[in-house]
Each structure stands twice: as C-alpha cells, then as structure tokens.
Amino acid sequence: MSARPAPSARRAATTSRCAAPRLGELREPRMALEHLTSTTVRPQGPIGIRWIAVLAIARCRIRPQRPTVWPNATREGARLTGAARSVRPRSVGVKPHGATRVAVLTAVAVAACPVIADAASGLPPFTTAPKASGSSGGQAEVFGVSAACHPTFDRLVIRARFGTPGYDVRYVRRIREDGSGRRVRLRGTKRIRVVVRNARGHTQSGANLLPAVLDPLCSNLRQIKDAGDFEGQVTLGLGLRRKTGFRVFRLTAPTRIVIDIAH
C-alpha cells in the first residue's frame, strides 16, 4: 500500500495542476471571465467557482451595466454574470420617486377624472348659470320624479311621455307655488327652481302622478317638493345645502330630463 501524501504536497500538486494566474493579474473583465470558465481550469478545495468569480470581479473592479455572456462561456460563466451583477456599486445618479411626488401626481389625476369623463361622454359642464330648452311635439305627461345620491353629485330625474317637454332650471331666492304664490319651505339654505313647460303632472282624468315631497337627504340635494301643476307647467322646488354648479341634459326611451347637482 502506497503512503498517502502529506497535505502540503497535495496543495502543491493542486496549484501546479491549475496553473492559474494570480487574481491581481486579471485586469480585464473578459480575461477574468474566459480564464474562470475555461475547461482547463478546475480549482479544487472548498472554494467553488462562484466565490472565485466574486473575488476576481472585486479585484479587477468590474462594473458591468447589463448581464453579458461571452461566446465561449460555459454554464459556470453564465452564473458568473449574476455574481458580477450582485456586486455592482449602487448608482448615485438615479433618484427614486418620493412619496410627495406620487401624492401630487395622484391628486392631479383624481382632479382631472371628472373633466375627462364629462368630455368623453359629451355631458355639459357644471355651472351655476340658468339652463333652458324648448319643447317639441304635443303636451307631455310627467309621470315620475326620482332622486339618487352619487359620490360627487346628486341626481334628479324627471320622466315624461307623449311628448318632449321644455325646461327652465335656475337658482332662486325662494320657491313659490304656481297660482297661489304661497312660499314653499324646503330643507337646506339654497334653492333651485325647476319649471317643466308644455307638460302636465296628472292624467287626462285628473289623477295626480307626482309625489308631493321627496327627501333624498343627499350630500347637497336635501329635499324636493311639488310646487305646482298649473296651465301646462309643472314646477318643482329643490332644497340644497350649498350653492354649487349643476348641469341639465336629456335622455330618451323613455324621455327624461336629468339634473345633476355637484357636491
């Protein structure tokens, strides 16, 4: 049985078999990569190819900007690319977006959303100016009034049939009943008067079709009252919490007058 060589002899044999240059001599990144991935270099011992790659890159001061695999690189060379990327120094020229900038951009986008949505859908803008439109066809029959609360506005819908009624919607100081002139008291501090022209709120036999009072209690629209059905004209009074812009437009099938009041 042959004698087992001493540890120092094994280390010497390993060094001569590798014939690897010192890390200080590997000045070029490509030279380091080709040397470490060469099939003739097979380092022994507990230090694997990954740790040698890290040491070579650190010594040669390689700062790659993107993963690179040279044409003659083996699978271990591809692993070296990941190691090189992991020791790349942190860039000082890139400034990440801060929380303040993100908050500002978010606020701008949210503020622009209603304007973009209105322009895309062709709806009129919210203003405090009076809105009016004429009628067409025979006398319309107003058979329904409803209200709904939305996140940014409150909506009143007036339904009609047998014709297209006209309308006049505006802010007023107070609401008065048609015919008698008595004051109509409403919730809130501001008033909008809605006049539906060339229309009636009852059937041909005289049955009333409109509710006397609606209390939606929305953010701005608090109350709606019937203020008259007299001589081809239906009047409604709206009680608001504050004066804001509103818009009026028509819908069909069935015929509707829609009034949106901003919060």
Image (cartoon, rainbow, N blue to C red):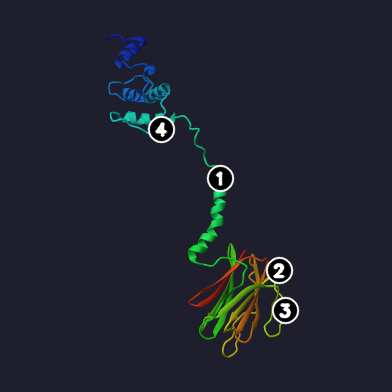
Q: Earlier in the sequence, mark 3 or mark 1?
A: 1
Q: Amino acid at mark 1?
A: Arg
Residue drawn at (55%, 46%) of the image: 102
Residues under labels 1 and 2: Cα distance?
Answer: 39 Å
- Say the numbered circle drawn on residue 26: none
| Tag 3 residue | 183
Residue beneath disc 2: 189
Q: Between 133 and 109, which is closer to the camera in this rendering?
A: 133
First reached walking from the N terminus: tag 3 or tag 2 = 3
Quadrant location, the N terminus: top left
Mark 2–mark 4 distance (CA, rounded to whole Å): 66 Å
- For badge 2, the amino acid type reads Thr
Secondary structure, mark 1, is helix
Who comes first in sequence, dot 4 or dot 1? 4
Residue that lies at the very extreme toward the bottom in this rendered image: 205
Residue 147 lies, in percent from the top left, at: 59, 72
- Secondary structure, mark 3, is strand
Which label sits on residue 65? Answer: 4
Q: For the point 39% across and 17% down, which residue is it?
A: 24
